[in-house]
Image (cartoon, rainbow, N blue to C red):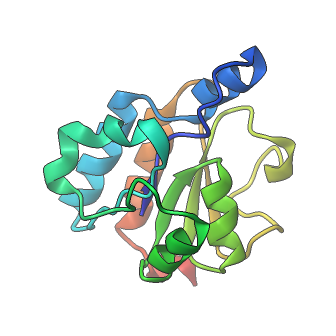
Amino acid sequence: GLVWAAGRKMDDPVTAREYWRRSLDQAALGRLIEGLVQRGSECVPLQFGEDRDQASPWRDWLLEGLGPTADFAATADRVAELDLVISVDTAMAHLVGAMRRPIWLLLPFSAAPRWGAQGRTTSWYESMRLFRQPRPGDWQSAIDQILAAIATWPQSQA
């Protein structure tokens, strides 16, 4: 499962800045989808809202995702069917972590304090692995980390 954009709250400058900082740009999203498919993964979009359309260029590579009116219960049902969810820092990460399902979280360079300043794990969710930008705005390196890790997944989860 894939989630590439944080909540789109553009009315307030602070939440708009957080949206842009935590969300993948078009190039990063394409690199992630193409890289996962090339490595044999099937991608299920779990993105909510108008950001769902960002994946349109890759729609032929994506399985059926959530319906446009899906609620958290329907989302939880879909997540329960998946082997892994890859998400940016948004509510989906907490849902998947609380369900104790495998989740890989893409974090911006200056992530929220709840994720700590470094490291690949969090005390919040045992099933979560963190992938951090090494520099502000560098999603490509974080995605490269994910693509390298997927080659040995699930063995690397032990």
Q: Compared with residue 3, is residue 19 higher up or lower down, i.e. above or below? A: above
Residue at point 29%, 57% (across, down): 36
Q: In this rendering, does residue 135 appear at all?
A: no
Left or right of residue 75, residue 62 in this image? left
Residue at point 53%, 53% (across, down): 87
Q: Compared with residue 39, is residue 88 higher up or lower down, i.e. above or below? A: above
Quadrant for residue 10, please give it: top right
Residue at point 72%, 64% (across, down): 121
Quadrant for the N terminus in the image: bottom left
Q: Compared with residue 154, is residue 67 higher up or lower down, i.e. above or below? A: above
Left or right of residue 129, residue 147 in this image? left
Quadrant for residue 67, please give it: bottom left
Left or right of residue 52, residue 103 in this image? right
Q: Compared with residue 77, is residue 56 higher up or lower down, i.e. above or below? A: above
Q: As rendered, which of 31 and 19 lies closer to the eye?
A: 19
Left or right of residue 93, residue 80 in this image? left
Query: x and y percent of residue 72 in the render?
Result: 60, 66
